[in-house]
Image: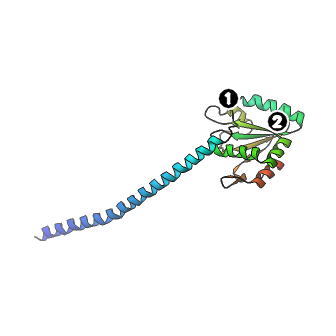
Amino acid sequence: MKKLSLVAVLALSTMAWAQTTNKPAESKNSADKALLVKSDAAELEAKKKSAEEKAKLPKPYDPKADAQADIKKLVAQAQKENKKILIQAGGNWCIWCLRFNNFVQSTPELKEIVDKNYLYYHLNYSPDNKNEKTFAQYINVKEQQFYPFFIILDKNGKKIHVQQSEILEEGKGYSKEKVKEFLQNGKIL
């Protein structure tokens, strides 16, 4: 009888313990599921807005372009016009690349600086055309790159500076003051 009572007590204790430990897990899982649903919905909404914005912006990158030939022509033109070359590396898939191009092109003060001092080229990086040989002339292609980034060449095609873009960002766009400083000085640290 003592054994039977002991087994019954142990069985009831185990069942009670299992129920108390499962309840918080179940409610936690429910909360997690609710958070996941909210997070997924917010993420989908953000992706939708980004896709809508991307669709409206100009697409300056040409995956079919022969970048080496294009840059060679730009160097000849830069020598004649005594200008530097501003290469914006990225692709039409990159919302930040499209935003930067649009920002510069639609801000008269910035566009004037670019037009006066640079020949502006968009060096494509995409699955269609990674332009690895061209990139290898200016950067270590084995290192992780964040797009867009900028390569400044002198009028003879010699690399002066490679500039990362995150320092130019402000909110969901770019800082006019920082971009202006970058364009005027060819770098910003």
The residue under the point 83% across, 33% down is 75
Q: Disc count in the image?
A: 2
Find residue 17 and report its image quarter.
bottom left
Give above or below for 104 relative to 158.
below
- Asked whether the residues under the numbered discs 2 and 1 touch, taking CB atoms below 8 Å apart as contact, a structural biologist would say no
Helix, strand, or loop for circle 2?
loop
- Tag nearer the camera, 2 or 1: 1
From the viewer's perspective, is 156 left or right of 5? right
The residue under the point 71% across, 46% down is 100
Find residue 8 and report its image quarter.
bottom left
Could you tell me residue 41's position as x and y percent? Answer: 49, 52
* Residue 122 can be seen, yes or no: yes
Could you tell me residue 64's position as x and y percent? Answer: 67, 29
What colour scheme has been applied to the protein in the rendered image? rainbow
Helix, strand, or loop for circle 1?
loop
Find residue 161 and report its image quarter.
top right
Q: Earlier in the sequence, mark 2 or mark 1?
A: 1
Q: Nearer the viewer, residue 1 or 159?
A: 159
Taking the view exactly as shown, the residue that stands out farthest to the left is 1
* Residue 139 can be seen, yes or no: no
* Residue type at tag 2: Gly
Q: Nearer the viewer, residue 109 or 33?
A: 109
Taking the view exactly as shown, the residue that stands out farthest to the bottom is 2
Q: Which residue is mark 2?
A: 157
Q: Which residue is mark 1?
A: 64
Q: Residues within 10 Å of mark 2 (few under 14, many from 20)?
A: some
Give above or below for 43 relative to 134.
below
Question: The N terminus appears in which quarter of the rendering?
Answer: bottom left
Could you tell me residue 82's position as x and y percent? Answer: 89, 38
How far apart are the two marked residues, 2 and 1, measured between alpha carbons? 22 Å
Could you tell me residue 44's position as x and y percent? Answer: 52, 48
Give above or below for 170 relative to 66.
below
